[in-house]
Amino acid sequence: MTALIQNRKVFFNYEVLEKIEAGIELVGTEVKSLRAGQGALDGTHITIRGGEAYLIGMDIPAYQPKNTSADYNPKRNRRLLLTKKELAELSGKESARGLTLVPISVYNKGRNLKVEIAIVRGKKKFDKRETTKKRETEREMRRTLKGE
């Protein structure tokens, strides 16, 4: 299980409540591009429409730009592969007040590519300050232990 792309801002901007694994529907060149480490999850979110989940805003550049078709859209909406039970659970959680669905990472699982989805609640400014303060104190503790 090798992480190919990660969205590190999720843990700073949101409080992660639950994580779910989902498959992703891709074109062959997109798979090659992701395995090469190209792509970005910044500003990406998940929407459930018509009984299907879609990954919106994920940028996957062309693997070979000169060899790609002219109508290729790197920011197209990509369908997530989930069971009906998981979709029903996610749509219920998404409709709850203040909860959002956000991808955390894209990774290999065997020969398949998977997306790790998080059900999150947005942090307030003081929560973000608290997170930064906690991170700084942990860093200082590691420095002092390393120096001894």
Image (cartoon, rainbow, N blue to C red):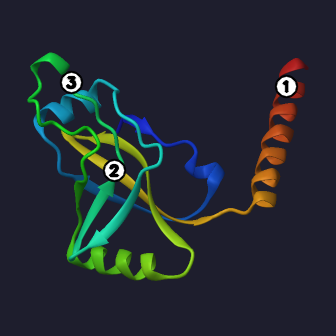
The mark closer to the camera, 1 or 2, is 2
Vertical placement of 128 versus 91: above or below?
Answer: above
Q: Residue at x 26, y 79 (%)?
A: 85
Q: Residue at x 86, y 40 (%)?
A: 137
Task: Rate crowding at label 2 as few (under 14), some (14 to 19) or many (20 or more) other CA atoms within 10 Å.
Answer: many
Q: Residue at x 29, y 35 (%)?
A: 60
Percent x, y of residue 66: 14, 16
Query: How much space separates mark 1 and mark 2, taking CA atoms?
Result: 35 Å
Residue corresponding to mark 3: 63
Snapshot quadrant of residue 98: bottom right
Vertical placement of 48 versus 10: above or below?
Answer: below
Q: Which mark is residue 143?
A: 1
Q: Residue at x 40, y 83 (%)?
A: 92
Residue corresponding to mark 2: 115
Q: Which mark is residue 124?
A: none
Task: Rate crowding at label 3 as few (under 14), some (14 to 19) or many (20 or more) other CA atoms within 10 Å.
Answer: some
Look at the image and tell me in which quarter the C terminus lies: top right
User: In the shown orientation, is residue 126 left or right of residue 47?
Assistant: right
